[in-house]
Amino acid sequence: MERRSDKHAPRADEDLVHEVEPLERGAPVEPRVEEFREQEGAADDQPVPDARLAGGRSAGPMDADELEARSELARSLEPSAFPADRQALLDSARRNHARQPVLERLARLPEGQTFENVEAVWLALGGGIERRF
C-alpha cells in the first residue's frame, strides 16, 4: 500500500521525503544548510555541554588520546577479519587505508598469536581497559 498525502502535490511529497531522509537514517551530523535544524545553544546563565561524555563513566587508566587511538584501531580493522593473526590484521588495515600509526602498532604485535577481537589486539599492544560505572 502506497502512502500518499492529499494535502500536497506528489512533487511536494517527494521534496518532504528527501528533507527528512537524513533524520530518518540517523545522520551523525546535523544538517547545516538549514538554520532552523541547528541545535540551540545554551542560555547565558547555563553551562555549555562538553562534547565528551563525563559523569557516570570513568576511563580509568585510559586518557582521551588513548581512547581515540583505540577507536582508530577499531575503525581500521574489518570485523570479518577476526579471529586473525598479525599478518591478517595488517592486511585488513591496509585494505581499509589505515593511517601509518595504526600500521606501526599492528606490526608490533607478536607473531604466532591469534586475536579473537579488537579488544584482544588492543590489550596485546599494551592498551588499557576502559572502566564504566
Image (tube, rainbow, N blue to C red):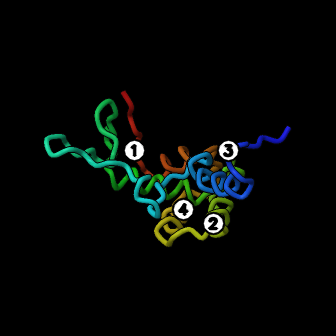
Q: CA distance from mark 4 to mark 2?
A: 14 Å
Question: Earlier along the polypeptide chain: callout 3 or callout 4?
Answer: 3
Residue marked by disc 3:
7
Q: For mark 1, does the 10 Å Cα neighbourhood hold few (<14), some (14 to 19), or many (20 or more) residues?
A: some
- The disc label shown at residue 106, or none: 4
Residue marked by disc 1:
128
Q: CA distance from mark 3 to mark 4?
A: 58 Å
Question: Earlier along the polypeptide chain: callout 4 or callout 2?
Answer: 2
Q: Nearer the viewer, mark 2 or mark 1?
A: 2
Q: CA distance from mark 4 to mark 1?
A: 16 Å
Q: Nearer the viewer, mark 3 or mark 4?
A: 3
Give the amino acid type for the residue marked by disc 1 in the picture: Gly
- In percent of the image, x 72 and y 43: which residue is there? 5
Q: Nearer the viewer, mark 3 or mark 1?
A: 3
**Residues at discs 3 and 4 in contact (Cβ within 8 Å):** no
Give the amino acid type for the residue marked by disc 4 in the picture: Leu
- The disc label shown at residue 73, or none: none
- The disc label shown at residue 96, or none: 2
- In percent of the image, x 76 and y 43: which residue is there? 4
